Amino acid sequence: MSLPGRSHLVGLIGGGITASLAPPLHERAADRLGLRYLYRPVDLEALPGHPGPVSAQHGVRLLGAARELGFSACNVTHPCKQLAVALVDELSEEASRLGAVNTVLFRDGRMIGHNTDVTGFAAALAAGLPAADLTRVVQLGTGGAGSATAYALLAAGVQRLELFDVDRPRAEERAAEYARLFPGAEVRALSGEQLPEAVGEATGLLNATPIGMHHHPGAPLDLELVHPGLWVADVIYLPQETPLIRRARALGCPVLPGGGMAVGQAVDAFTLITGQAPDREEMARDFAELVTAQQGPSAPTPPTPVESTPAHAESQPAAEDEEAGR
């Protein structure tokens, strides 16, 4: 529980995160709860004196420095999620199984790693698509976001999960890993040739690639493959509606845009950091307002935390690990 008069100093460490929505989203929630809360991004691509490629090792060093400087916690994103695992003293179950952390708490000199990408997507799925048929789901992308969503889908009860990635060996590695973690489910990797048939027989489709973002325009598959028997989810929230989500909505499919995962992740991270749960609906409204202010209106703007819609406001991943729009 947050102590009276206690202040929270929080950082976000990653590459390309200067425009992240996480700082204002967290700070607005803290203001409503009367908390002193300062959230600052540490963009590895914008640090003075550190030109050249983004260094995950440098990000992890900064995470250790944040503990020494008295930070309360840090969110970490691409490219630091996996390397940070070796630095922390303790891991939550989800973070341990995934081998990735996105929230690190500093408590009594110890570093405790969590993964709220998993819990955030799980909450969005439950709230936004409560009647989703989990018999057979196809997921596109097995990078950082995709690892979390695949775990959440299987934990939610998906019976058959089929993973497609342009990096076929990675998809096969992820499939074998999840088959071991969830022996009651069938998990396999798809080839490009197998994808159309698999989507045609699926009950759900999830995009966990960056394809559809403003700087990765387009769709992650042939949109003619989308059919009315699917529910469709996306991890991307900038733009608010991707071509995939628009196509699915036009066909009458239940949809879950990426705002749901974004807000779910932020809610869980904020709760871990402060010991107080923010109002999810208020945070969803803040999120929609911040996205609109940053990118302009998009049709339609969701009215609730997750709709048959919204609810991370972490920062966006790069290429396959690009976080969907933070």
Image (spheres, rainbow, N blue to C red):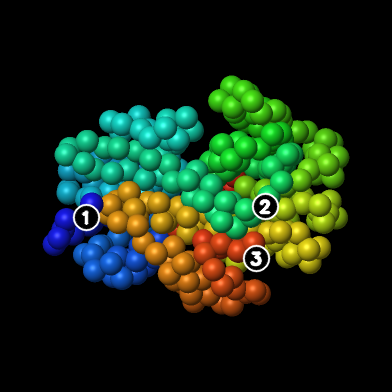
Residue at position x 52%, y 61% from top? 311
- Residue at 59% x, 70% y is 302
Residue lying farthest to the front in this orientation: 131
Query: On the picture, is 99 further left or further right than 110?
Result: right
Q: First in sequence: mark 2 or mark 1?
A: 1
Whichever of labels 3 and 2 marks the residue nearer the N terminus, that label is: 2
Identity, as a three-letter code, of the amino acid under mark 2: Ala
Which of discs 2 and 1 lies nearer the camera? The answer is 2
Q: Which residue is mark 3?
A: 241
Residue beneath disc 1: 2
Upstream in the sequence, badge 3 or badge 1? 1
Question: As rendered, which of 313 and 66 lies closer to the eye?
Answer: 313
**Label 1 crowd bin: few (<14), some (14–19), many (20+), radius 10 Å:** few
Q: Residue lying farthest left?
A: 5
Disc 1 marks which amino acid?
A: Ser
Is 111 on the left-hand or right-hand side of 53?
left
Provide residue 141's location: percent of width, then percent of height: 65, 42
Q: Is residue 179 above or below residue 76?
A: above
Residue designated by label 2: 131
Mark 2 packing: few (<14 Cα in 10 Å), some, or many (20+)? few
